[in-house]
Image: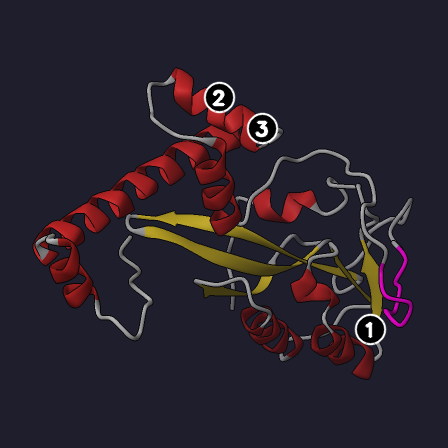
């Protein structure tokens, strides 16, 4: 098997050892990438229609459409896209005792003015050659997007940049988010607490607490 990351034996030398022209290897790799992009486009389209589809149902759907896939590939692609089925989940892990807990503060709260509540969420944008992740920070009263950032990875840095941009405009009484690692990180929480913003977190399994931000059709920013 050819290992592209094998630093001791370059790809061209591995091809020589097994008698495979290097051009054939790169052609096959390119074909594989194109096929994965096609599958991700189809996953994206079906997920928009049926967001409750997990990897098992998504695999079955693609097989019915005539595509040669297995569940392992679909798991990998959906994980890469940062999507999963929307359904209430059991709490399968126990948080570390030193993790700071934040309650959900918005139950039965009337949103009556700007800067009362901000919210943040991450979605993905399909591109011609892959996907980008979008984080948006929105004011719940006006539904105005205060700041947004794009990234090709799901690390916390692009979320911190968006928060910094939003805080240059104003600041809310309450900042609400889901329990994604980007928002529960120490750096993100510290930025909010330093300026006296109350932190609200969606409860585990409550997948619709904060869902409207990613469906807001009126994306605009300063």
Going from N to C along the chain, the mark reached first, 2 or 1, is: 2
Q: CA distance from mark 3 to mark 1?
A: 36 Å
- Residue stretch in magenta: 95-103
Q: How is the image coloured?
A: secondary structure
Residue 208, position in %: x, y?
Answer: 73, 40
> Label 3's element?
loop
Going from N to C along the chain, the mark reached first, 3 or 1, is: 3
Q: Which residue is mark 3?
A: 53
Who's the residue at 77% across and 79% down the image? 190
> Label 1's element?
loop
Residue 188, position in %: x, y?
Answer: 70, 74
Q: Magenta part mainly helix, strand or loop?
A: loop
Residue, far top: 64
Give the answer, above or below, for where 62 lies relative to 101.
Answer: above
- Lateral position of residue 100 relative to residue 26, left or right: right
Viewer-nearest of discs 3 and 1: 3
Q: Which residue is mark 2?
A: 60
Disc 2 to disc 3: CB gap under 8 Å: no
Residue, far bottom: 194
Q: CA distance from mark 2 to mark 1?
A: 45 Å
Q: Which residue is mark 1?
A: 197
Q: Nearer the viewer, residue 194 or 112?
A: 194
Who's the residue at 65% across and 65% down the image? 182
Snapshot quadrant of residue 185: bottom right
Residue 9, position in %: x, y?
Answer: 25, 71
- Lateral position of residue 133 relative to residue 191, left or right: left
**From this viewpoint, is residue 50 visible?**
no
Q: Nearer the viewer, residue 127 or 167?
A: 127
Q: Neighbour class for label 1 at 10 Å: few (<14), some, many (≥20)?
A: some
Q: Neighbour class for label 2 at 10 Å: few (<14), some, many (≥20)?
A: some
Q: Which mark is residue 55?
A: none
Residue, far front: 17
């Amino acid at each position: 098997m050819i290992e592209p990351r094998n630093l001791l034996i370059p790809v061209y030398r591995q091809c020589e050892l097994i008698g495979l022209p290097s051009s054939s290897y790169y052609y096959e790799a390119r074909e594989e990438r194109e096929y994965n992009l096609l599958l991700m486009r189809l996953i994206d389209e079906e997920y928009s229609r049926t967001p409750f589809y997990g990897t098992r149902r998504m695999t079955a759907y693609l097989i019915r459409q005539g595509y040669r896939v297995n569940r392992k590939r679909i798991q990998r692609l959906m994980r890469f896209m940062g999507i999963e089925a929307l359904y209430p989940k059991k709490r399968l892990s126990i948080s570390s005792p030193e993790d700071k807990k934040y309650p959900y503060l918005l139950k039965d709260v009337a949103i009556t003015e700007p800067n009362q509540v901000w919210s943040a969420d991450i979605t993905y944008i399909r591109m011609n050659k892959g996907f980008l992740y979008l984080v948006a920070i929105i004011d719940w009263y006006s539904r105005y997007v205060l700041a947004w950032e794009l990234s090709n990875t799901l690390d916390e840095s692009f979320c911190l940049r968006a928060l910094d941009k939003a805080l240059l405009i104003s600041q809310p009484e309450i900042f609400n988010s889901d329990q994604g690692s980007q928002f529960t990180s120490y750096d993100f929480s510290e930025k909010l607490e330093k300026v006296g913003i109350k932190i609200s977190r969606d409860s585990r399994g409550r997948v619709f607490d904060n869902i409207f931000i990613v469906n807001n059709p009126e994306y605009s920013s300063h």
